[in-house]
Structures are given as structure tokens and as C-alpha cells.
């Protein structure tokens, strides 16, 4: 829409003036912005204020202590471990989901009998609540009564008792499996839609000219689906960075603090250790970091058009 | 392209194997909810129950645990309705009048991408002070606010597709701006409204972390209730499964009826569908 047409609409004479026309557009955004400030601005400001104090749930002393809590952030080994765990999960799960989703989308791109049914069934995990997905895999991974160990026993030929959610070597694979199970279909669905919009005649022409598959994929297909793929990566990357539910259900951050992510750790500090001011400092750090990353990503990817 | 190189039987084998992987855990969750305790704790695992029995569900209804599904329904429905109303109004202003320019639009969408854990702690302290913890309105306001960026983002896209001429002629015919919005724009973006509402509903329905922090006993949602059965002893399996199924079936039904909107909804409009 050009700015001329906007002016034309704004200047259109209106006979019944119940509301000043000039303010109409502001009245429209007012309630939404008010609510958005509740989740967008208030937490930021309030976190900042109490992060300079030394509040706990029992100690309501509101005197200011300067940067004490921020100094503690840098000394908090457990916090940096949690950030590391979060980055590890993101770095492993995101590429796997992307590649698997892309392969599945290629596999189901061409029509075949029953295609719609297969797609509908594959997509189910994505709709389920993450906490239910975690609970489901907790049942699946049970050492004795769960089917996972049973299937592995059949495949290997002798009985296996793997403690998926307790064994330090197996907790991360368990989390990856659950994450990939739930979110690969998400990637699959978006990439399937993107792939089906790629111009087929272009591909056929390239094939006739004797171009090989990798070349066609990287020169034609990938550039065509990139805008959509970039947004899928952004959404999933941010979701993985704030992962909470699945870990809460599967391991609770354990064994020990081995699978504690940044969200789990913040929850523990705020709602189990009741370190109000310190939690606020962590929250502020996360919001500040994410604001920079997210705003950069949105502008960079042309998300805002 | 890969697919065309594979023979059809091979393709089918691959697709069926994948479908099994994605569907089997859902199947397992459902059958546990129908099993007797003997079948649940039988070694080796029972792959399909001998008979379907509803005792596990009966317990949930008798103890009142099933009420948490009702709480989820109330919270998700009302917050979806509010978010759709306020969000569409805001989206209309953004789309037609470019209110706030690109900066406002970017700020709004960046709110969708904030980690809930970072905002929930200050909100919790505020709610304690307001005595809003464990109330319907407390969670409804929070869900509405948290859904707004998504609604605004999606509806802005849909509204931009409405031809401007329709609105102009309605104005010339003497409609007020509010009437144009109600009588022209809303009906035109009806399908977009429904599609966006489904995803807003699913978000609130599936939420765990906000409900975990802000509910105690009165407005506990089904997601929080499921985690109440986690514990050292594993004899709550039947309850975990039955409660999960109660919370999952409604969402399957909602999404199944709205399937054609799925792609545009989850890709946040990146793929026009």
C-alpha cells in the first residue's frame, strides 16, 4: 500500500463523527499496547530495580546494593553451566531437526497414495503440549516397563536395562530424542510448504541440462526456500534456548544439575531458593541478551518486511 | 527430487517407518491410559491391552482432577477471545495507518520471542502484591498479553490482503471507522481470524510454565496436574497417561478441524497458505 492511498483513506470525508477520526488509529492500538507493556516493559524495569537490591522471599529489605548481584552472575559457576547446557541442546537439536525435517519434506513432496494421512499423523507430536511430550517419553524410557529398552533388547539380542533419565551418558540423548520427536514435524511441515512453492519447471530444466542433485539443491532449491527456512530456524532456535517443559518432565534438571538449562536454573533460584534479587538479575541478563539477538535477527532476516 | 529417484515401495517403507516413529509414543500414551495396573507393570511390556477399560479416567473424575481440563478450557477460551479482539484492532491500525512505523512492529514481534522465564518472575512478584495468584483473571490477562504479538503479527498480514477499495466505498457510504472495521474488515478476514485463534488457543492450552508459577489449587491447569503425578514411586503411571490424554484429545480435535490453516499459522505467515 502506498502512502498516497493511506492519505486518501484518512482524508475521506466522514459524515457521522462519533469519535475523532484523527485519534481512531490510536484508540485501536491503545488496549493492546497497554497489555503488551505488562509483559514487555514492566518485567524489564522491575527486574532492573530489584536486581540492585538484596531481596529474598523472607527478607524485604529494599535498600540498594549496587552491582552486587551482577558481580555474582560472573562468579556463578552453575549459571554458566546452565547456559552451556542450553547452548549444547540448541546446537545439537536444531541442525538435526532441520536436516531431518528437510529430508522428510523431500520424501513426501511428490504425491503418493495416502500422502495426506501420513502428513497428518506425522504432525501430531507438534500439537501436543511439551509437558505431555516429556511425560510420554518418561513413560517410554522407563528402564523396565517402557518399550524403548524392550525394542533395544530385541535389536541387540540380549536384555538391556538402560537408565535413560538417570545415567549421565544417556540423559542428553534422551532429551534430544524427545525434542527431535516433537519438533522435527514442525520443521517438516514448514519446509514441505516452502518446497512445494519452488518452481518445478526450473528444476526440470536444470535436470535436462545435466545438473546433478547437490548442485540443483544448493543453487536453486535452497535459495528459494531460504526466507521461510530462516524464520523456521529463528523460531526453533529461540524455543530451544528457552527449553523448560520437556526437561522438567524428563529429568527435572538432573542427575544433579547435569541437564539444568537456563530456564530451569532461573526457576530454581526464584521459586525454590527464593533468591528474589539474584533471580531478577538473571532475568534481566536474559532479557537484555535476547533483546539484542532477537532484534538483530528480525531485522537481518527481513522478518519485518 | 530425492523421492523421484527412489522406487515407490522404497519410499513407502521409509514413510511408514517415519510415521511409526512419530506416532508410536502417542499410541503408547493412549494405551497406558486404558490398561489395568497389572498390564502397566507387566514385564515384558504389554504392547496392546487385552480389553479397553476406563477405570483410570473414572478415578480422575471421581477425585475431581479432571476439573483441571475445564480450567484449561476457560483460561484458553477467554484469553483467545480477548487476544483476538484487541490484537486485530491493533493489527488493523498497524496495517492501514502504519501506526508507530516499523519500530513498533519490530518491538511487538520481539515480545513474542522473549523467554517466559525472564518475564514470569517479576510478574509473579506483581501478582503476589495484587493478590492475583491462583485466579482466573490473573492468568487470562497474562495469556492474552503473551498471545498478542502473535495475533497482531498474523492479523496484520491478513488485513493487508483486504482490498482498500472496499473500505473506501464503505466510508463514502457513510459508515464510521468503527463500522468499517466491524462490518467490512472483520468479515473479510474471517478465515484468518479462525486460523490465528486456533494457534492462540493451542498456545494457552499447552502452556506449562505460567500456570506452574501462578496457580496453586483453584485454577490449576491440566499440564500442571500431569506433573503432580510425577514422583519417586511410579504407581501414578495410569493417572499421568489418562490426564495427558484428557488434555490432548481436545487439541487434536481443534487442530483436525482447522488443518488447512496449519502451515501458515505455525510459520507465522512466512508461507502464505
Image (spheres, coloured by chain):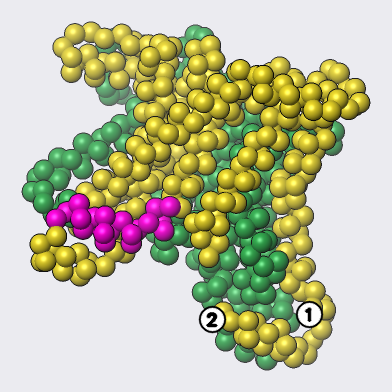
In the figure, is residue A175 to the left or right of A158? right
> Would residue B37 be seen by someone viewing this image from the given angle?
no
Q: Are marks 2 and 1 on the same chain?
A: no
**Residue B136 shown in magenta:** no
Q: Which segment is the magenta one?
A: A212-230
Callout 1: chain: A
| Relative height, residue A112 to residue B239 (above, below) | below
Q: Which mark is residue A21?
A: 1
Query: Which chain is represented by yellow in the image?
Result: A
Q: CA distance from mark 2 to mark 1?
A: 21 Å
Quadrant of residue B69 in the image? top right
| Relative height, residue A69 to residue B211 (above, below) | above
For disc 2, the marked residue is: B163
Q: Position of residue A251 (x, y in %)?
A: 49, 19
Label 2: which secondary element = loop
Total numbered labels = 2
Amino acid at each position: 500500500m502506498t502512502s498516497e492511498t493511506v492519505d486518501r483513506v484518512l482524508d475521506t470525508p466522514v459524515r457521522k463523527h462519533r469519535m475523532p477520526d484523527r485519534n481512531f488509529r490510536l484508540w485501536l492500538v491503545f488496549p493492546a499496547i497497554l497489555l503488551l507493556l505488562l509483559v514487555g516493559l514492566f518485567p524489564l524495569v522491575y527486574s532492573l530495580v530489584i536486581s540492585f537490591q538484596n531481596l529474598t522471599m523472607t527478607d524485604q529489605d529494599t535498600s540498594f546494593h549496587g552491582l552486587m548481584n551482577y558481580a555474582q552472575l560472573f562468579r556463578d559457576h552453575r549459571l554458566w553451566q546452565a547456559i552451556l547446557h542450553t547452548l549444547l541442546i540448541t546446537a545439537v537439536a536444531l541442525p538435526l531437526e532441520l536436516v531431518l525435517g528437510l529430508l522428510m519434506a523431500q520424501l513426501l513432496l511428490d504425491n503418493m497414495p495416502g500422502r495426506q494421512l501420513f502428513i497428518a499423523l506425522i504432525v501430531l507430536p507438534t500439537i501436543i503440549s511439551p509437558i505431555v511430550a516429556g511425560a510420554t517419553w518418561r513413560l517410554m524410557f522407563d528402564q523396565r516397563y517402557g518399550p524403548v529398552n524392550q525394542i533395544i533388547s530385541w535389536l541387540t539380542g540380549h536384555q538391556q536395562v538402560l537408565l535413560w533419565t538417570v545415567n549421565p551418558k544417556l540423559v542428553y540423548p534422551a532429551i534430544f530424542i524427545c525434542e527431535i520427536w516433537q519438533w522435527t514435524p514442525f520443521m517438516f511441515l514448514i519446509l514441505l510448504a516452502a518446497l512445494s512453492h519452488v518452481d518445478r519447471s526450473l528444476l526440470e530444466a536444470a535436470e535436462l541440462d545435466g545438473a546433478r542433485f547437490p548442485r540443483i539443491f544448493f543453487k536453486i532449491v535452497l535459495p528459494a526456500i531460504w526466507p521461510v527456512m530462516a524464520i523456521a530456524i529463528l523460531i526453533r532456535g529461540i524455543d530451544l534456548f528457552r527449553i523448560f517443559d520437556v526437561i522438567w518432565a524428563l529429568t527435572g534438571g538432573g542427575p544433579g544439575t547435569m541437564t539444568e538449562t537456563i530456564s530451569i536454573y532461573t526457576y530454581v533460584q526464584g521459586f525454590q531458593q527464593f533468591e528474589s534479587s539474584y533471580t531478577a538479575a538473571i532475568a534481566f541478563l536474559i532479557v537484555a541478551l535476547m533483546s539484542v539477538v532477537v532484534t538483530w535477527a528480525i531485522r537481518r532476516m527481513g522478518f519485518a518486511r | 527430487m530425492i523421492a523421484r529417484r527412489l522406487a515407490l515401495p522404497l519410499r513407502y517403507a521409509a514413510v511408514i517407518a517415519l510415521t511409526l516413529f512419530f506416532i508410536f509414543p502417542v499410541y503408547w500414551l493412549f494405551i497406558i491410559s486404558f490398561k489395568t495396573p497389572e498390564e502397566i507393570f507387566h514385564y515384558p511390556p504389554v504392547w496392546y491391552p487385552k480389553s479397553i477399560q476406563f477405570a483410570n479416567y473414572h478415578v480422575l473424575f471421581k477425585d475431581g482432577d479432571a476439573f483441571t481440563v475445564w480450567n484449561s478450557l476457560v483460561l484458553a477460551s477467554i484469553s483467545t477471545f480477548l487476544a483476538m479482539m484487541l490484537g486485530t484492532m491493533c493489527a488493523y491500525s498497524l496495517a492501514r495507518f502504519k501506526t508507530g512505523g516499523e519500530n513498533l512492529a519490530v518491538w511487538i514481534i520481539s515480545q513474542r520471542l522473549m523467554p517466559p522465564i525472564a518475564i514470569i518472575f517479576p510478574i509473579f512478584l506483581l501478582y503476589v502484591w495484587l493478590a492475583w495468584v491462583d485466579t482466573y483473571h490473573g492468568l487470562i490477562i497474562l495469556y492474552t498479553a503473551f498471545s498478542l504479538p502473535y495475533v497482531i503479527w498474523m492479523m496484520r498480514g491478513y488485513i493487508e490482503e483486504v482490498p482498500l477499495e472496499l473500505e473506501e466505498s464503505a466510508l463514502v457510504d457513510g459508515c464510521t471507522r468503527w463500522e468499517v472495521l466491524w462490518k467490512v474488515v472483520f468479515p473479510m478476514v474471517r478465515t484468518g481470524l479462525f486460523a490465528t485463534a486456533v494457534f492462540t488457543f493451542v498456545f494457552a492450552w499447552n502452556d506449562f510454565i505460567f500456570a506452574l508459577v501462578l496457580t496453586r489449587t483453584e485454577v490449576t491447569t491440566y499440564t500442571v496436574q500431569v506433573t503432580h503425578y510425577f514422583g519417586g514411586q511410579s504407581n501414578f503411571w495410569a493417572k499421568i497417561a489418562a490426564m495427558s490424554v484428557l488434555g490432548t484429545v481436545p487439541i487434536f480435535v481443534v487442530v483436525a478441524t482447522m488443518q488447512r490453516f496449519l502451515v501458515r499459522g505455525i510459520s507465522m505467515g512466512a508461507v502464505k497458505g
